[in-house]
Amino acid sequence: MTIRPHFWFMAGASILLAPTAHAASPVEILIGDAGQRDQDGAILVDLRLLNGDRDPQTVSLPDRIEARIGAAGSVRTVWLERAANVPASLTVPPGGFMRARYCFRAPSDLTLDGATLSIPAWRSQQITVALRSATQARFHIRRLANSSGHDGHPCGDRSPSR
């Protein structure tokens, strides 16, 4: 039996590529919110990049990424576009998180309110879309601040003394 050079090339390539193909990133990308519309009508998708490692991790963010919208028993593909003010890569501190924003324009025949959104390339997590305008979001945060006696931040007092 003669082993051809092609076999050795393929065996070597599989050994070199195996660690990168199976290495899990210590950064988990989660969908934090979806549904707020910007002034142009695009739907905003807020992401949280969580670093569970002891070292800083740099994450590359593509210009566009495929997402899936599930509504009324069907699933459609939409393309999320990285917001103009978000860099192409972020360095997430050890044990910390960073935020990133994407947006998309939904087809006019797609009912989004109450639909589920997922980004398969970044996990199987889904979030329910709750449509609202930018004005509604600001009003809701102000209402929370006024009713709770906090300083206007929806999570309460963020001073370092606590």
Image (spheres, rainbow, N blue to C red):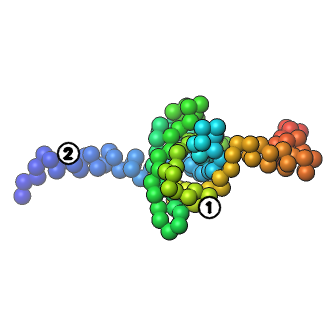
Residue to which mark 2 is pinned: 9
**Amino acid identity at mark 2:** Phe
Residue 146, x across and y down, in percent: 90, 47
Work out which residue is located at the far front of the displayed protein and give it: 108
Residue sitting at x 60%, y 38%: 40
Near mark 2 (Cα within 10 A), the count class, few <14, some 14-19 or many ≥20, is few
C-alpha gap between disc 2 and disc 1 = 51 Å
Q: Is residue 107 left or right of residue 13?
A: right
Q: Upstream in the sequence, badge 2 or badge 1?
A: 2
Write the residue at 56% across / 58% down. Answer: 111
Query: Is any part of residue 26 visible from this angle?
Result: no
Q: Quadrant of the N terminus?
A: bottom left
Toward the viewer: 90 or 118?
118
Decide if residue 5 is on the left or right side of residue 156.
left
Q: Which residue is mark 1?
A: 114
Q: Position of residue 141 (x, y in %)?
A: 80, 46
* Marking on residue 21: none
Give the position of the C terminus as an image quadrant. Answer: top right
Q: Residue at x 59, y 31 (%)?
A: 85
Q: Position of residue 35 (x, y in %)?
A: 63, 50
Q: Element at badge 2?
A: helix
Image point (79%, 49%), residue name: 140
Q: Residue furthest left?
A: 1
